[in-house]
Image: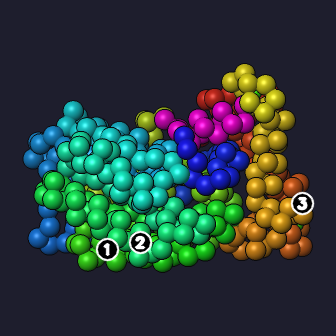
């Protein structure tokens, strides 16, 4: 997997533990108008929805396209599972995303990764990586790439449903690296409106969780940017199901955990690669991660190095305005202990991402 940014190998981390609480999170759009909202989100006069076409019995090719948030996003596997549960053998599901990619890659690779597969529905998200400041991709340039992809796709596949997505907020250094993310996200909302496309906006749901329960947020997004399996199940899938007007199904029956697989491999090798993550390996991993957050390398994190404040304050256990390595590791150790259900001081592959 390619990295989303230079620190990815460090940032992809681990932690774990689920608790079903966030399952109660209801997407804002659902709160506004109940279960019929998703249908109303599709502008009048636009193409038929994915669900309506599946209901009529036709086979559908669905492609997800975007960054590592899609490439290693367990939500794609979970969505494919729910579609299969509802419409057996009708859906060909292709995850064409690329870790580390932005919309320049997206535009360049679009024919090969998307158009050639003759999709009926395509999900697109690149805002989170277009917003990385060092890449110097302007909002205008990102918009041109996005609108170009939309136009090319509709030219090749006039009836294709295109769904734009705004993803979860990054935190820590990954937030610091994207100071203008809000403008890139807003551009997606604006383009969806202009082009009369469906928008699935995950941002407000995640933001609400971040503000109300930062501890759970960092369990669901342990490396600061990639939601792991639990996060996808508890936060992303309820939004997707609502927006697509799908019967809920049982996404938890899909046990794939692509982000965890990566994190596990990164941790496991620290002392001895043996398909087990010891406490020592786990601590070493988070120590490296801590250092990747420490912009001025002075051994402590300050509020300008780790954002937003609500999560900083959660990690700053003694509330003295800095986060030490010990404070940082303490949070992740609580995740380890909850995961290590047989308390042998090691995590094996199944334990580390098990959803309790
Ligand atoms: Ca090991
Ligand atoms: Ca520092
Ligand atoms: Ca402190």
User: Is residue 206 among the parts visible in the rendering?
Assistant: no
Report the residue marked by disc 1: 191
The residue range painted magenta reads 256-268
Q: Quadrant of the C terminus?
A: top right
Please report whichever mark, 1 or 2, sits nearer to the chain's N-terminal start. 2
| In this view, 130 is above or below 249 | below
Residue 81 in the image, given as x and y percentages of width and height: 35, 39
Most extreme residue toward the top is 274
Residue 299 got which mark? 3
The answer for how far apart the CA atoms under marks 3 and 2 are is 37 Å
Residue 6 in the image, given as x and y percentages of width and height: 65, 53
Residue 99 in the image, given as x and y percentages of width and height: 51, 48
Q: Residues within 10 Å of mark 3 (few under 14, many from 20)?
A: some
Of residues 24 and 326, the one nearer the viewer is: 326
What SS does tag 1 mark? helix
Marks 2 and 3: in contact by CB < 8 Å? no
Please report whichever mark, 3 or 1, sits nearer to the chain's N-terminal start. 1
In the picture, measured across the screen, residue 196 lies left or right of residue 255, that is: left
Residue 21 got which mark? none
* Figure quadrant of residue 48: bottom left
What SS does tag 3 mark? loop
Report the residue marked by disc 2: 141
The answer for how far apart the CA atoms under marks 3 and 1 are is 43 Å
Would the CB of label 3 be found within 8 Å of ligand 2? yes
Ligand 1 image position (quadrant) = top right
């Amino acid at each position: 997997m390619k990295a989303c940014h230079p620190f990815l190998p460090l940032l992809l981390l681990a932690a774990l533990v689920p608790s079903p609480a966030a399952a109660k999170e209801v997407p804002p759009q659902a709160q506004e108008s109940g279960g019929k909202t998703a249908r109303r989100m599709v502008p009048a006069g636009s193409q038929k929805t994915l669900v309506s076409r599946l209901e009529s019995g036709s086979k559908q090719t669905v492609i997800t396209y975007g960054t590592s948030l899609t490439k290693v996003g367990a939500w794609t596997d979970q969505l494919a599972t729910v579609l299969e549960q509802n419409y057996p053998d009708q859906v060909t599901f292709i995850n064409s995303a690329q870790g580390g990619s932005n919309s320049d890659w997206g535009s360049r690779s679009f024919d090969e990764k998307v158009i050639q597969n003759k999709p009926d529905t395509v999900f697109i998200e690149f805002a989170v990586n277009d917003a990385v400041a060092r890449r110097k991709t302007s909002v205008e340039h990102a918009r041109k790439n996005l609108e170009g992809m939309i136009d090319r796709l509709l030219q090749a596949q006039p009836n294709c449903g295109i769904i734009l997505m705004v993803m979860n907020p990054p935190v820590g250094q990954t937030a610091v690296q994207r100071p203008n993310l809000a403008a890139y996200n807003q551009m997606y909302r604006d383009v969806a409106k202009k082009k009369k496309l469906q928008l699935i906006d995950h941002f407000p749901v995640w933001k609400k969780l971040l503000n109300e329960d930062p501890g759970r947020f960092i369990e669901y997004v342990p490396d600061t940017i990639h939601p792991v399996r639990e996060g996808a199940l508890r936060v992303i899938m309820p939004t997707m199901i609502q927006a697509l007007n799908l019967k809920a199904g049982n996404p938890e029956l899909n046990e794939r955990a692509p982000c965890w697989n990566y994190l596990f491999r990164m941790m496991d090798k620290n002392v001895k690669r043996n398909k087990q993550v010891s406490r020592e390996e786990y601590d070493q991993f988070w120590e490296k991660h801590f250092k990747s957050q420490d912009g001025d390398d002075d051994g402590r994190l300050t509020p300008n190095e780790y954002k937003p404040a609500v999560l900083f304050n959660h990690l700053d256990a003694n509330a003295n305005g800095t986060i030490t390595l010990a404070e940082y590791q303490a949070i992740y150790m609580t995740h380890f202990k909850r995961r290590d259900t047989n308390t042998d001081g090691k995590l094996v592959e199944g334990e580390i991402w098990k959803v309790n």
